[in-house]
Amino acid sequence: MHLLLVRFSSMGDVVLQTATINWLKSLYGAHIKISFLTSKEFSSLIEDHQYVDNLITFDRKKEKWPELSAKIKKLHQESKIDMIIDLHATLRSWRLRQSFWFIPSLTVDKRRVERFLLTKIKIGFVKKFLGLPIFAMEPQVERIIYDWKDIFGEGNNLSALRKFIGSDFGLKQLTFLKKEKQSPHAKPYIVIAPAASFAPKRWPIEKFAELIEMVLAESSLNKFDLVILAGPADEYCKNLNSITSERLVNLQGKTSLHESMKYLAHASLCVGNDSGMNHISEAYGNPAITIFGPTDEKFGFAPHGVNSEAISIPLWCRPCSTTGKKTCFRDQQYCMNGISAERVFLSVKKCILHAL
């Protein structure tokens, strides 16, 4: 059986869908062939995956739609595609399915109704106010299994399944991505990831600076260096250069995605916003502390590892959007400004000391 999995973006979502790859492989073993289609900028997340037989990339800035169609057509001619699994459910992925209408397809349920209830009706806040069980969606890494297990089956290989997917299946760590043996940094280190796709999702850089100062001053953590990871456009991270310490390494804009993955693979902990860096950390089986503001853990994107933690504060207006793109209507963003550096520091200390 040959399956084509489609997820164009974003970084965190592509990482989380590697759980789907592992689940399908655990069920069918050598009897399944998996191809994966994603945007070129995220190819590093998939190219070394041990269960992906073919990686197809689409460069939205340089390639036209006929070029992508030609790639899929060639793949189908070389090895017949038995099913397209649309893990994105966008207009682009719908167009792809329509272009290859003769290939059976499945489309992921993105829980749009549930997201509407959480963001527009504030159902989570209402239920909490009334003392009712709080509404939440299942973890993203398990959602496909819940929806499609009647189609693909759980099989008799549940022990293998438990190695790859979420906590309700007895997970102790997520190990989706293949880890290279050599660490890029000589000493143990904590990754600080201040970036996020949209500004409202970013914990203020001043608070990251406070957190870094606290970690550097804590004697029980003095064997750990701090490595800052962020992209070329995240220039606000340069504000952290004012902290003078040999234990602090600012790599903002200095690493490719693949190189950043190497750092995350060997980190003792990743501290960041609701973004792809934290998902990558957990995909390597490492803990992550994720700070949530305008988005919400109840969407199913909270960290899952044993020593991982989600940090947020309860506000009636949370979540205000599904992506965190919406500008706050207040004069200041309380969901982020209300999370103190000391609160995050205590979680860092707890996580690191627990792992020692």
Image: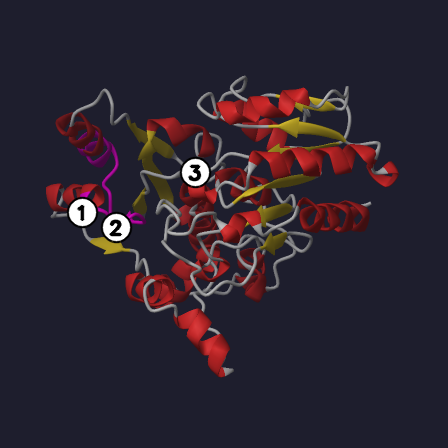
Q: Earlier in the sequence, mark 1 or mark 3?
A: 1
| Residue lying at 56% horizontally and 66% vertically, measured from the top left | 168
**Camera-nearest residue between 8 and 190:** 190
The residue pinned by badge 1 equals: 94
Tag 3: amino acid:
Ala
Does the magenta segment cover residue 76?
yes
Quick one: SS at disc 1?
helix
| Residue lying at 12% horizontally and 46% vertically, measured from the top left | 98
**Residue at the far top in the pictured view:** 254
- Residue density around tag 1, few if under 14, some if 14–19, many if 20 or more, within 10 Å: some
CA distance for labels 1 and 3: 29 Å
Q: Which residues are magenta?
A: 73-91
Mark nearest the camera among 2 and 3 is 3
- x, y (%) of residue 240? 63, 25
Tell me: residue 62, above or below residue 292. Answer: above
**Which quarter of the rendering shows the C terminus?**
top right
Mark 2–mark 1 contact, CB under 8 Å? yes
- x, y (%) of residue 22? 47, 49
The quarter holding residue 238 reads: top right
